[in-house]
Every structure is written in structure tokens, then in C-alpha cells.
Image (cartoon, rainbow, N blue to C red):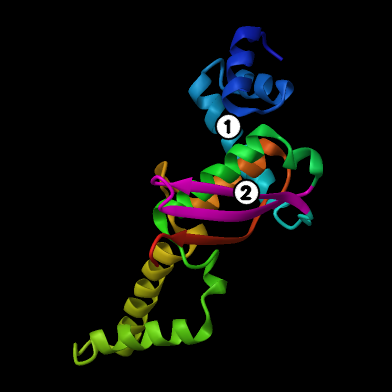
Amino acid sequence: MADVSSELVKQLREKTGAGMMDCKKALVDSKGDLEKALVFLREKGLASAEKKSSRATKEGVVSSYIHGNGRIGVMIEVNCETDFVAKNEKFQSFVKDIAMHIAAMNPKYIKEEDVPADVKTSEIEIYKKQIEGSGKPANVIEKIVEGKFKKYCEEFCLLNQAYVKNPDLKIQDYVKENISVIGENISIKRFVRWQLGE
């Protein structure tokens, strides 16, 4: 491996939480360019996060977040693979971020598969009625209906929502990023959100 300053390796480690050898390799491959090394590690991390996503999550934490002088409260359970990670500061911070996002964005479900069949059917019927009489071919209507339901999921399914702290990132991508940094599978198990007066 070509020489890369230990200071640069240290900077990359602090930014990503990746291992020292991974940071050094990323910097060598990117010829000392910190930004390129960050992209390299992110891509590598997301690929390894995909592999970890099938592993069992039996540990974790139940956490809460109170917002707006006690006007909104969220309780959430997020699981990981080991008790060690459950106590990890990065994991705890991730859980708080998700709870804060839920307080702000008010999702109804965790993922698209959680939308009850009757709700999905009802939404699809509404979309079809909206397009009725437009004279569009059936295959075009079907695509429009699919697109509208996708928008519904982006509004009401937590994993499909744009992350409130970084709208360029969906929550499911933020979860994957944290899986790659923490090194274990993470799953959002359940949540409940209360709003004063509701």
C-alpha cells in the first residue's frame, strides 16, 4: 500500500466510523482524496449493509422523544443483533434521530407492506375515480395509480419518507448507512406517536 498520512486516516475514521485498514485502503485507492475515499467507503458500507439485512435482531432499545414543550411524544423500539451495540452511543443516537423524525413527519406505518389491504384498496379506488373519464388508456391509468400510491407511501410509510435532517436521503437509506457504520443489522420494530388533544 502506498503511504497515506496517519492524520488523513484518522480524519476519515472520525467521519465514517470505519476500521483503520478500510480507511487506509480507501485513501490509497482514491490517491489521498478524502471526498473520494468517503464515497468509496459509503458504497462499500451500503453493499455490506445489504448482506447484513437478513440477520436476526433480538436486542435493541425502547426509547422516547418529547417535542414542542410536551405537545408531541414518540415511543419507539429499534432492534439490533447484540446487547453491546444496543448500548453503543452511535446506535442510541440513531434511535433518537428516528424518534425525532417520527415526531416531525407523523408516519402511520413502518413500511409499505404494513399498509392494511383495505386502506390500500380504498386509496386505489380514490385514484381511479380521480382519473375516470380522462380518456387515458388502461395501462396509462394503471401507471398513474401506481405512482399515486407510491406518493402515498412516501408520505405515510416511515422507511419511504425523506429524512427530516437530510431530505436527499430516505429513512431506509439512513438505516442502511447506520448498519454499515455500526456493523450490525438494525430494524425499526414499532413506534407510537401521541399529539396533545388528538
Q: Residues within 10 Å of mark 2 (few under 14, many from 20)?
A: some
The residue depicted at 66 percent of the width and 44 percent of the height is 179
Task: Find the magenta span and give its range.
Answer: 59-81
Mark 2 or mark 1, earlier in chain: 1
Left/right placement of residue 35 relative to residue 104 reads: right
Query: In this orientation, which residue lies closer to the viewer: 157 or 40?
Result: 157
The residue depicted at 39 percent of the width and 70 percent of the height is 152
Do the CB atoms of the residues marked 2 and 1 lie less than 8 Å apart? no
The answer to whether any part of residue 5 appears in the image is no
Give the quarter of the image for residue 166.
top left
The amino acid at mark 1 is Phe
The quadrant the N terminus occupies is top right
Query: In this orientation, which residue lies closer to the viewer: 103 or 162?
Result: 103
Q: Is residue 192 above or below residue 40?
A: below
Which residue position is annotated with label 1?
40
Secondary structure found at label 2: strand
